[in-house]
Image: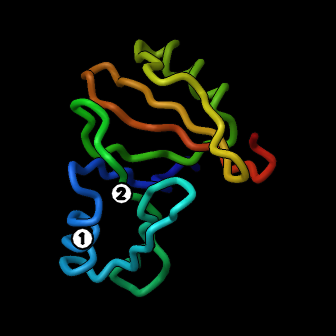
Amino acid sequence: MPTIVHLDIPADDPERASKFYSKLFDWNIELNLEFEYYMVRTKGLDGADGPGGGIGKRQGDQKITAYIGVPSVDEYIAKVESLGGKNIVPKMAVPGMGYLAVCLDTEDNTFGLWEDDPEAK
């Protein structure tokens, strides 16, 4: 079943935001120099691994976006559109990790789709 797999947190100052969230929630946050993106590892209240995330430089009026893991981004973009939503950031590869897209629901809320694929280029 599709579930939240990644939380993207835009920030004007990603280093400052990383310190804030690390201290607030005790999240493990490390800078990935290749992507200039702080990778976030979370834990659930039971101590089990929680959804991952990241903190990067804000683009425009970008807000926090939850990414839902799906078996096929293409398939789910089609479902979004058939249900009255919109695809606003087309499918793109994150090399060596997978594919993402960003959509709008029928209430103009953004959410992301994520497909794991270590062969993504």
- Quick one: 6 or 105, which is closer to the camera? 6
Q: Quadrant of residue 37?
A: bottom left
As drawn, 31 above or below 96: below
Which residue appears at 75% of the width and 40% of the height? 121
| 40, 38: nearer the viewer | 38
> Are dots 2 and 1 in contact, CB under 8 Å?
yes
Left or right side of 12 for 78 = right
Determine the image quadrant of residue 29.
Answer: bottom left
Distance of label 2 from label 1 (alpha carbons): 10 Å
- Answer with left or right where residue 31 lies relative to residue 19: right
**Mark 1, other Cα within 10 Å: few <14 / some 14–19 / many ≥20:** some
Q: Amino acid at mark 2?
A: Ile
Three-letter amino acid code of the residue under disc 1: Tyr
Q: Position of residue 50 (x, y in %)?
A: 45, 71
Query: What x and y, as percent, mark residue 114?
Result: 57, 43
Residue 87 is situated, as x and y percent measured from the top left of the image, at 47, 19
Vertical position of residue 8 compared to residue 40: above or below:
above
Decide which of 51, 12 is in the foreground and name it: 12
User: Is residue 51 visible to us here?
Assistant: no
What residue is shown with label 2? 55
Residue at point 28% right, 65% down? 15
x 47%, y 64%: residue: 52
Mark number displayed over residue 21: 1
Tell me residue 36's x, y (percent): 46, 55
2 or 1: tag closer to the N-terminus: 1
Determine whether the residue tagged by mark 2 lies in a helix, strand or loop: strand
Can residue 4 be seen here? The reply is yes
Give the class, few, some or many, for how many residues have Cα within 10 Å of label 2's Cα (few <14, many ≥20).
many
Q: Residue at x 36, y 24 (%)?
A: 104
Residue 32 in the figure: left or right of residue 17: right
